[in-house]
Image (spheres, coloured by chain):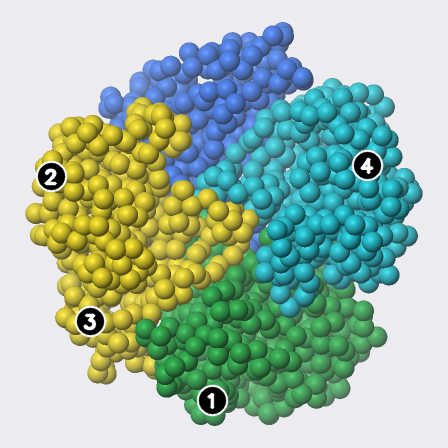
Chain colours: A green, B cyan, C blue, D yellow
C-alpha cells in the first residue's frame, strides 16, 4: 500500500481528493492535515464523510508528513508549495501540487501574473505539468507534478488537437468559459459568493486578466510549436460544479468539416481513457460529468465565418482538479490509470 | 459473477442502478432493457455513461431476460411488475421491484390508494419490504423484494426508533417532506416540471393524499405494534436530488432529552452501515448525502411543546431508491452489504 | 409630498424599500443612510438601481435625519432601534422599525429570547404590531410601528382565521416554514451562506428555538384569546426569495371540510387587498408572489387524521418585510393602502 | 385611454406584457386572448395575477380584437403574425409583433433561416425594427413594429457603438450568449427543459445555426454600413431570466483604451433611458436587471490580443421582449418612453 498524505485536506479540492481516495484499493490515507489550531474530525467539517471515513485532520507538521507519506498532495493557498515542496522532495516523497506554483515554466511569467517573485525556480525545472492526456510518460517518471488549473484543463483539452494539427490560426483564439462556484474555493467566503448575490445570475469576471491565461498560453504554445496569446474570459454560473469551455478559432485554409475534426480528435485522444469526443451536432452538458473525472468535447465547423467552435465540459473539482491529481498519482505509482476514477458522473 | 438485469434502464432510477452497478465487482450487467421500438446505445440517452459504459439498451423481451439473468431489477411504471414479476420468479430469478406494486401488504389498501385491484395478491405474500435497516434477514432470504418508496424510506428511518421505544404517541405524527425534482421521474415531462415553473420556487402537492402515505403507515404501524395514521405533506424543492424529512410527534411522558434520544437512535441503528445519527443541535443537510446511499438523522426534543422533531436526509435516487435496491441485492446474494455503495456523497 | 428616510438603506430590506419607494407618487426619498465611513452612490452597491435612481447613501447623522424626514424606516441590526427610535419620535417623526425591537409586548419575553434586557420598555407601549390584515386601524393612528418578522407574517396569516373561529385546538400547532436565503440578510456573509454550501441542498436550522417563535405565539395567542405555544421549524431552501409556511393543527370537533374553511378564510380576509385564498385542492407556489406584496393561502382538511393544513406563500422581502412596511406607511399617511404595491409578482 | 389587446396572452411573453401593462396609467387592457377551446381566468394559468388582475383570457376572435383595440400585441408562434397582422393593420390598429415574422428585411433570408417562404413580403416593407435605442423616430411613426429577438437585443446593444465608430473589424465578431430558460417559452414542455435535466448544468445549443443570427447580422450590418457575418453561440444557463452577452471583436488600429470606449458608448447612448454603461473594470450581472427594462453594458480592451470584449445584460422577457414592446407602444402612442417601465430590477 502506498502511503498518501494531503496537506490542505479541508478545502473543496482536498475534500474531493479524500472522497476519491477513500475508495482507492492501492493506497492508504496516511496523513490528513490543514493549518489548524487543533485537530478536528474530518466529518465535522465535511459532512459527506459521516459514516464513510472516521479520521482526523491533524495540525500540519512537516516532520510527521515526511515520516508518514510516500506521496503527498498539496492543496494550499498560492505561494505555499513553492516554499515547502522542496522539503518533501528532499525526503524522497513524491509531490502533486494543486496550486499554480509550479505550472508556469518561466519564473518571469510567474512574477508578472502572480505579483511576487518565485521562491524556487530550481523546482520549476523538475516539475512536470500534470495533464495526463498530454504528458502521460513524463508524469510517470516525475517527482513533482504541477496539477493543472481547472480552466486550463478544459481549454487545453478542447483546443490541443486544433493546434497540433494546424487547423486553426494560433493568433485567433478566444476562450469563453463558464464555471460553477466551487471553483472559488471554500475559504473564499465573501459577498461575491454570498448565495443571494450569485443565485439566479450570471456574470463575467477578470476579463482578459485571469491568472490562468498564461498557463493556457504556455501549453497551447508548446503544442503549436510557437508562442501565442489567447483572449480568455471566465464567467460564474449559479451551479456548484462544472466548467463549460466554448473556444473559438479561425480556420487555416478552407473546406474543413465537423466530421473531419471529430475524426482527428478521436485519433488524438485514442489513448485518453477519460476524454470522449461527441458526434457532430451533439454538444456537451456539464451535468454529464458531475462528480467524475471525465471530459466530453463537441465540435462545430461554422462554414459561414470559417471558424471552429470547440466545446468541452469537465467537473472543475474532478477532471479540473482532484480527479486529475489522482490520475497523476496512479501514473506515478504504476497503478492502472483509472483506479478509483472510473465511476460515471452523477446524473441527473 | 452474478448476472444482473434491469428492466426499465432508462428512467432516473434505472440510470442510477447502472451508475452504481458498473463499479460492482461481483456482478455482470447482463441485460439492460426498456420498452423501446428499437435498441439504443445507453450513453446516447444517459450522457454520463459516455466513456464509462459501452452497452446497448435492448427492446424488452421476457425470454431473453429470463435466459440471461440471475437477478432482475424492475424499474417500470406502476402496475407493470404485478403483471410480469411472476414469470421471473417461476423461472428461478430473484426480483427487486422498484415500484409500489408489492409494498402494501393489503390488496385492499392497494386498491384504495392506487385505484385499481391488485393482479397478484399471492405474490404480495412472498414479497419482503426491502428496507435493510428493518428487515435485513428476511431480505437475505427473499425471492421478491418490494423496494421502498423514497418518502417512506426517509420517514420510516426518521421515526422507527421513536415508535419502537414508545417515545411518541402514534396518533400525533405529522411528516413534512421536501424533495428534489428527480423524484418525479424522467418520463414526467409536463408543465409542472418545466424548468422555469419550478426554479426559484417551493410548493406542496398532494397534501394528505400522497400514495406513499399508506406505505409509511403500514411500516410505522408494524413497528408500533398497532395501526396508526399519519398526516404526510410532500413538497417540491428546486434541487435535483435529496429528501429532507421533518417529522413531528407528541412525546409520551415528560423529561425526554435530545441526548437521550440520540443515544437510543444510535443503539437502534448500531448495525446500520449507512445510517448516521448526528450529535444534538446538529441537523442534517441533503447535500451531505448527494449521490450516495447514506442517511443522516438529527433530533430535537422541544420541551416547550413536549414534542420531538426527527429530521432525516437521503438522496431520493440513492438510499431512497437505487442505492437501497443494490443494498438489497447484496444481501440477497451474500455480498458484503456495502459493496459498490460505500463512496461518500458528492460535496459540495 | 411626505418626506421619507431610510436608516440602513443598503441591506436587502433597505434595498427593497428603495425599489418600492422610487415608484411611490406621494412621497419623496429625502434621506438614505447607513453606518458608513463615507458616503457612497446607492447604485454602486445596489446595481439594480443604475439608471433608475441617482442618489447617495449618506453617513448616518441623526440630526440630518430628523430635519429632513416626516417618516423614517429603520432597517438596522437588532438592538439599534430600541436605542435610537425615541429621538425620532420626540422630534415628531413617525417610525417604522423593521427589526424585532418593538414586536414583543413583554420586555421579559424579549430578554428571554434575545438575551439582553430591553432598553425602552416605554416605547413598547406605544408600538403597534404592523400587520395591516390584523391591525389596520391601529396602524393608521400609530407613531411607532413594529414591522412583523417574515416568518411570523406567513404563519400568522395562515393560521389567524383558524384560531379566531375556534377551528383548531391551540395546543396542537406545528409550523414548518421554508425560506429563501435573502432572509439571512446581506451582511451575513459566512460559510453557512456561501453559494456552494447551500445550492442544491435543503436544511432545517434553529429547530424549536428560532427567535420568531415568541412573536408568532404572541399574535396567535391574542387572536385565540389565550396563551399558546407552537413548535416552529424554519428551513433554508436554495432560492433567493419566498417563504412557504406549512402549518398544521388538530381540528376541534369533526365534520370540517376544506370548502367550509375556504369560505371562512375569504370572509376573514375580505378587506385584505393583498391576501388571496385559493380554491380547494390548489396550493400556493412561492414564485407566484416573487417581488410583490401579495400573500396566497391554500387549505386542506385531512379527514383521516382530523387535522388541517394551512399553507401560505409570501416574498420574505415583500409582504414579509418591506412591502408590508410601505403598506404600513400608506396607512399612517392616509394614502390608498396599495400605493406603489399593486404590481403582480415576477413570473416566471 | 388607449385600448390595448394581446393575442397570445398566456405565454411567458404575453404574461410579462400583462404584468407590465396592469400598471400603465394611459392604457386599458381591452382584449386578452389565446388560441383556446374555451375562455379561462387569467389568474388560473398565471398565478402571479391573483389579487392583481381579475380578467378573462378569451378565445381568439379577430372581429372582436379589431373592434376592441387600438393597439394589438401579437405573441403567437412563428408564422402566425405574417398571416394575420394584415387584417389588424387594414382595420387601422397598430401592431407590435413579438415573433420573428417581420424582423428580417429580406424575404429570401427569412425563407433560408425559417424554412418556409414569407407570406406577406409587402408587410415587411412597412415594418419597423423595434429597437428604440436605434430607431426611436421611425417607431413613433410606425403602424407595424417587429419587436426584436432577445439575443439580438443583447448583442446589438453591446456591439452597435463599436461598429458605428469603426472601432472593430466587422469580420471578426464572435458572440457568446448565456440565456435563462424562460427564453424557451412556456409551451416548449419537453425533456430538454425538464427541471432535472437543466438544473445544475450548462450547455450550448444551435451552435452557429441559431435563427437569431441573421437578425443580428442584418442590424449590425446596417450600422456598419456593409454586410457582415457573425459567429453566434447561445447557451442555456439554469436561471429563469436574464441574458448575458459576451461579444468579442478585433480592434481596428491600436491604442484603444477601455476608458475611451466607455466615453464613446456613453455618447452613443446618451438619449437611451434604459441603457447604462458601466465604469471600466465593472462587468454587468444579469441579476441587476431582473424583472426590468434596463440594459447594462461593460467593456474591456485587451491590449495583449488587441481585441475588445463588450458585455451586456438584459432580462430576456423584459428589455429582451415585453419591456421593449411596451417601450415601443409608448413611443407609438406619444406617451413618455418610460411609462410603466421605470421600476428597478428585483434584487437580490
Q: Which mark is residue B129?
A: 4
* A90 over D216 or under it: above or below: below
Residue at image point 43% right, 64% down: A235
Residue at image point 11% right, 39% down: D90
Total numbered circles? 4
Q: Position of residue C290 (x, y in %)?
A: 40, 37
Under tag 1, what secondary structure? Answer: helix
Q: Position of residue C169 (x, y in %)?
A: 61, 13
In the image, are marks 1 and 2 on the same chain?
no
Check whether the beta carbons of the residues at disc 3 and disc 2 lie within 8 A of each other.
no
Residue at image point 85% right, 42% down: B89
Under tag 2, what secondary structure? Answer: helix
Separation of marks 1 and 2 at Cα, in angstroms: 63 Å
* A227 over C105 or under it: above or below: below
**Few, some or many C-alpha atoms within 10 Å of disc 4 (few <14, some 14-19, many ≥20)?**
many
Residue bearing mark 2: D90
Under tag 4, what secondary structure? Answer: strand
B150 left or right of D199 in image? right
In the image, are marks 3 and 1 on the same chain?
no
Q: Which mark is residue D227?
A: 3
B266 left or right of D163 in image? right
In front of the other: B284 or C54: B284
In the image, are marks 4 and 2 on the same chain?
no
Snapshot quadrant of residue B316: top right
Separation of marks 3 and 1 at Cα, in angstroms: 33 Å
Amino acid at each position: 500500500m502506498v502511503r498518501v498524505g494531503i496537506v490542505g485536506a479541508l478545502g473543496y479540492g482536498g475534500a474531493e481528493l479524500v472522497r476519491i481516495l477513500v475508495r482507492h484499493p492501492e493506497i492508504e490515507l496516511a496523513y490528513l492535515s490543514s493549518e489548524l489550531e487543533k485537530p478536528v474530525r474530518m466529518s465535522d467539517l465535511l459532512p459527506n464523510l459521516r459514516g464513510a471515513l472516521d479520521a482526523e485532520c491533524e495540525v500540519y507538521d512537516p516532520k510527521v508528513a515526511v515520516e508518514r507519506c510516500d506521496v503527498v498532495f498539496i492543496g494550499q493557498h498560492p505561494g505555499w508549495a513553492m516554499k515547502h515542496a522542496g522539503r518533501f522532495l528532499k525526503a524522497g516523497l513524491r509531490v502533486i501540487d494543486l496550486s499554480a506554483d509550479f505550472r508556469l515554466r518561466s519564473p518571469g511569467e510567474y512574477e508578472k501574473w502572480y505579483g511576487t517573485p518565485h521562491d524556487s525556480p530550481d523546482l520549476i525545472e523538475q516539475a512536470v505539468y500534470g495533464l495526463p492526456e498530454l504528458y502521460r510518460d513524463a508524469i510517470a517518471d516525475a517527482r513533482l507534478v504541477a496539477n493543472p488549473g481547472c480552466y486550463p484543463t478544459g481549454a487545453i483539452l478542447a483546443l490541443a488537437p486544433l493546434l497540433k494539427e494546424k487547423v486553426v490560426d494560433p493568433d485567433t483564439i478566444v476562450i469563453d468559459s463558464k464555471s460553477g462556484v466551487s471553483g472559488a474555493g471554500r475559504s473564499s467566503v465573501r459577498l461575491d459568493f454570498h448565495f443571494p448575490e450569485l443565485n439566479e445570475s450570471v456574470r463575467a469576471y477578470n476579463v482578459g486578466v485571469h491568472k490562468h491565461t498564461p498557463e493556457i498560453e504556455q501549453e497551447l504554445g508548446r503544442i503549436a510549436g510557437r508562442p501565442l496569446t489567447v483572449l480568455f474570459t471566465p464567467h460564474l454560473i449559479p451551479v456548484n460544479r462544472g466548467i463549460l469551455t466554448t473556444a473559438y478559432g479561425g480556420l487555416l485554409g478552407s473546406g474543413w468539416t465537423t466530421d473531419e475534426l471529430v475524426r482527428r480528435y478521436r485519433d488524438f485522444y485514442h489513448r485518453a481513457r477519460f476524454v470522449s469526443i461527441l458526434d457532430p451536432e451533439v454538444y456537451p452538458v456539464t451535468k454529464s460529468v458531475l462528480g467524475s473525472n471525465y471530459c466530453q468535447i463537441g465540435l462545430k465547423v461554422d462554414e459561414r465565418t470559417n471558424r471552429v467552435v470547440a466545446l468541452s465540459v469537465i467537473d472543475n473539482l474532478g477532471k479540473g482538479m482532484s480527479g486529475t491529481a489522482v490520475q497523476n498519482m496512479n501514473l506515478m505509482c504504476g497503478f492502472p490509470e483509472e483506479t478509483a476514477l472510473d465511476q460515471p458522473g452523477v446524473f441527473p
